[in-house]
Amino acid sequence: MGGGRWALEGTAALNPDVEVLGTRRDLAEYLTTLHPARATGHPGVRLRGGEREISRFLDAIAAFPQPPQGSTPSD
């Protein structure tokens, strides 16, 4: 696998390394949850792919969303 092919919809990429599955509402909630509270087992969201690629995906989105100004990350 070459890496870097991620899909948010089943038709977004052929043979993605990571698929992010869930309803629009669940995905929005997942992606707007601050990184320390975000988990691969988030209710309503399923990440499908190899462990290494899922880890790369989670690392890539760890910077989003930004914590409110004046707060500090807890991890």
Image (tube, grey):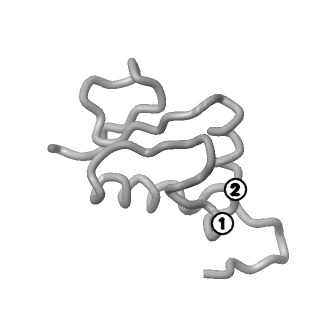
State the image quarter where residue 71 is shown: bottom right
Number of marks in the image? Answer: 2
Q: Residue at x 24, y 46 (%)?
A: 3
Q: Are marks 1 and 2 in contact (CB under 8 Å)?
A: yes
Q: Nearer the viewer, residue 7 or 71?
A: 7
Q: Residue at x 47, y 38 (%)?
A: 20
Q: Secondary structure at mark 1?
A: helix
Disc number for residue 33: 2
Q: Residue at x 62, y 70 (%)?
A: 36
Q: Residue at x 56, y 42 (%)?
A: 45
Disc number for residue 37: 1
State left or right for residue 56 relative to residue 52: right
* Relative image position of residue 47 (x, y in whole percent): 44, 45
Above/below status of 5 relative to 14 = below
Q: Nearer the viewer, residue 71 or 53?
A: 53
For the C terminus, give its image quadrant: bottom right
Disc 2 residue type (three-letter): Thr
Disc 1 residue type (three-letter): Ala
State left or right for residue 25 relative to residue 63: right
Badge 2: residue crowd in 10 Å (few <14, some 14–19, many ≥20) = some
* Relative image position of residue 1 (x, y in whole percent): 15, 44
* Relative image position of residue 74 (x, y in whole percent): 67, 81
- Residue placed farthest to the left in the image? 1
